[in-house]
Amino acid sequence: MYLKIKNLNKIFEQRKGVQNINLQVEEGELITLLGPSGCGKTTLLNLIGGFLSPDSGAILVENEDIVKLSPEDRPISTVFQNYALFPHMNVIENIGYGLKYTSLKKKEQLDEAIKYLKIVGLEGYEKIAIQNLSGGQQQRVALARALVLKPKILLLDEPFSNLDVKLKVNMREELKYLQKKLKITMIFVTHDQEEALSISDKIVVMKDGEIVQIGSPEEIYYSPANDYVADFIGKINIFYKNNKKFMIRPEEIQMVFSKEGEWVIDSKEFLGSSSLFYLKSKLNSETLISQVFERKSSEFLVGDTVEIEILKKTY
Ligand code: ATP
């Protein structure tokens, strides 16, 4: 196992922090720490990076406990949310900065920096001042600056949260591509569930400083461990029948026209490629959400009576 975290605890005042963290990451995996603000994602990342020391527990990289090592001595680099670039240095100086402290000669340092400048798609920007770059370009520089050190593990703390939606999606795809190409192990922090579902090999869902579920995006989405996970990851219908609780994703509820149907379409929310239909029961106070691809959704109008077909239960 590449990275192994055993019984890790770090408690601040008022029982805040992280506790009982057990996690294993394989070489070349991209795992995401996901959860709402304050659940302990950054604390866990800072413990791995060495910016915080734990109260107890072990962090092993290839079987070596790194807990006692300072951040510079860990085989780990971090990309921060605010990029944390050096404003008085140009692009290539920023990328090559960490190499000054290696045994590489000046020329080799420059060659390496240029190699990673190209990898992140910034060829030609060598001499540009940091403040003249867009947010997306700055984040690429931060990524190159971290990657050039060839860390065994790259930590990314909400790296794309300051970017607009379109750029964010592009950067996500590029990161995933680079991760596969360079076979680098990455731990990515986000509170954005869509981002987590789209890039992760494995998602670690956290709540109040503890891990509540670890699984592939599909496992987390279709087999959530509990209500908290189900509700946090996308929309979910929760209802009870015969003393049993059912949770069903909106896209698993199909509407069929039926005058005698139990459900009435109360409202519709247009989302672009699909629409959400909010249904009300004629028999009781139950409500449901059905998600329909836009091509089919124009067939249904608010006020229509429908029956539902459930394609697949979530859990
Ligand atoms: P966000 O998404 O808002 O960054 P997070 O999931 O990264 O949140 P953390 O920053 O890890 O959460 O914080 C976890 C908890 O520990 C929070 O309740 C926070 O207030 C608390 N905490 C974090 N750092 C400290 C500290 N240095 N001293 C005291 N409490 C702290």
Image: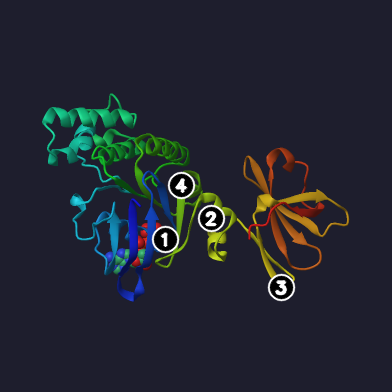
Judged from the image, the secondary structure of the residue bearing numbered disc 3 is: loop
Real-space CA distance between mark 1 and mark 3, rounded to the nearest whole angstrom:
34 Å
Kindly identify which numbered label has been placed on residue 220. Answer: 2
Amino acid marked by disc 4: Ser
Q: Is mark 2 within 8 Å of ligand 1?
A: no
Amino acid marked by disc 2: Ile
Which residue is identified by label 4? 200
Q: Position of residue 214 (x, y in %)?
A: 47, 58
| Sequence-first disc among 1 and 3 | 1
Badge 1 crowding class, 10 Å Cα cut-off, few under 14, some 14 to 19, many 20 or more, is few
Q: How many marks?
A: 4
Can residue 234 be seen by looking at this rendering?
no
| Sequence-first disc among 2 and 1 | 1
Amino acid marked by disc 1: Ser
Can residue 208 be seen by looking at this rendering?
yes
Judged from the image, the secondary structure of the residue bearing numbered disc 4 is: loop
